[in-house]
Image (cartoon, rainbow, N blue to C red):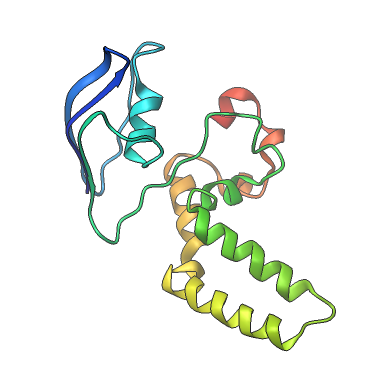
Amino acid sequence: MISANNVTYRVGKKALFEDVNIKFTEGNCYGLIGANGAGKSTFLKILSGQLETTNGDIFITPGQRLSVLEQDHFKYDEYTVLDLVIMGNERLYQIMKEKEAIYAKEDFTDEDGIRASELEAEFAEMDGWEAESNAASLLNGLGIDTALHYVQMKDFNGNEKV
């Protein structure tokens, strides 16, 4: 569960929003709607820890995490849809890429072996072996056909990217 308790965010003396109270519970999908400038992106940045509240608290149940992708629709053009979803867990994605680079080395050293072992342990702790199937389930749940999971984002039009 993620909850916001009496969250206020001020820009100077003006409150962008005040005393927001909400609980996001497991198994539900949520949408945040509002006019441009209403504070939707700011609120999401607060939930993700990128911004501090002026007042109030954010609580995330221990063991849960919040994944965020930026709004720039072109930033991820060189990634596949599946990779993009996995990138929502930044640390897991970094581990995957570092492991790939180590295993691709022609001159694999003892130090590389030790580092790979450390990465594999962290990867396993993060349920990394389930990352692709979990991402695929999420995409399928959003109505994105399995055949599109390995297509690069640049090959989608703007509406499809959203």
Q: Residue shown at 51%/61% (left/top)?
A: 92
Camera-side residue: 102 or 159?
A: 102
Q: Is residue 46 above or below residue 65?
A: above
Observer-nearest residue: 148 or 130? 130
Residue found farthest to the front? 12
In this view, the residue in front, 15 or 104, is 15
User: In the rendering, at what x and y percent does residue 24 appear?
Assistant: 23, 41
Name the residue: 78% across, 82% down.
108
Q: Quadrant of residue 152?
A: top right
Percent across and percent down for residue 55 are 20, 30
Q: Residue furthest right?
A: 106
Residue 140 x, y percent position in the rendering = 47, 47
Residue 73 x/y as whole percent: 60, 29
What residue is drawn where x is 45% and y is 58%?
134
Frontmost residue, 71 versus 19: 19
In the image, 66: left or right of 130? left
Task: Tell whether 26 sits left or right of 83.
Answer: left
Q: Residue at x 22, y 54 (%)?
A: 61
160 left or right, relative to 30: right
Q: How many marks?
A: 0
